[in-house]
Amino acid sequence: MAVTTTTPLEVDSAVVQLGQNIRLARIRRRMSQEELAQACDITRKTLYALEKGNPRTTIGTVFSVLWKLGLMSTTTALADPDADEHGKILEAARRPQRARQPVADDNDF
């Protein structure tokens, strides 16, 4: 019996959009799929799958293609901890309210 895995619809949509963006960037640079694939040391078939939004394309392949297209700077916002508002709220909730009780000062002159 084969086990099938599915990805959430939002993930599928994001991967398809990323593939379309990569394809458009490649076309704007007047690069063929074969040229870009060779430059990234991947097969044309792998690049085709990435551009079509195949969610099984490895992250290393995605970053290699983005690097070759000069788009690495666009990845800095991915999972940026400073933009993670939910994570910040959870972290703040785990902080102790007070580290220790204030010490009474008996040496008051």
Image: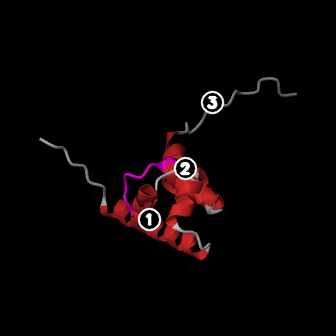
Between marks 3 and 2 in the image, the one whose residue lies nearer the viewer: 2
- The answer for how far apart the CA atoms under marks 3 and 1 are is 59 Å
Does residue 75 appear in this view? no
Residue 58 is inside the magenta segment: yes
Q: Residue at x 62, y 62 (%)?
A: 71
Q: Residue 41, which numbered label?
A: 2
Mark 3: give few (<14), some (14-19) or many (20+) Cα within 10 Å: few
Q: Are marks 2 and 1 in contact (CB under 8 Å)?
A: no
Tags 3 and 1 in contact by the CB under 8 Å rule? no
Q: Label 1 belongs to which residue?
A: 51
Foreground residue among 55 and 99: 55
**Disc 1, SS:** helix
Measure the alpha-carbon separation of dots 2 and 1: 16 Å
Q: Nearer the viewer, residue 109 or 99?
A: 99
Specify start and end residues of the magenta stretch as a single range.
53-60
Q: Which residue is identified by label 3? A: 101
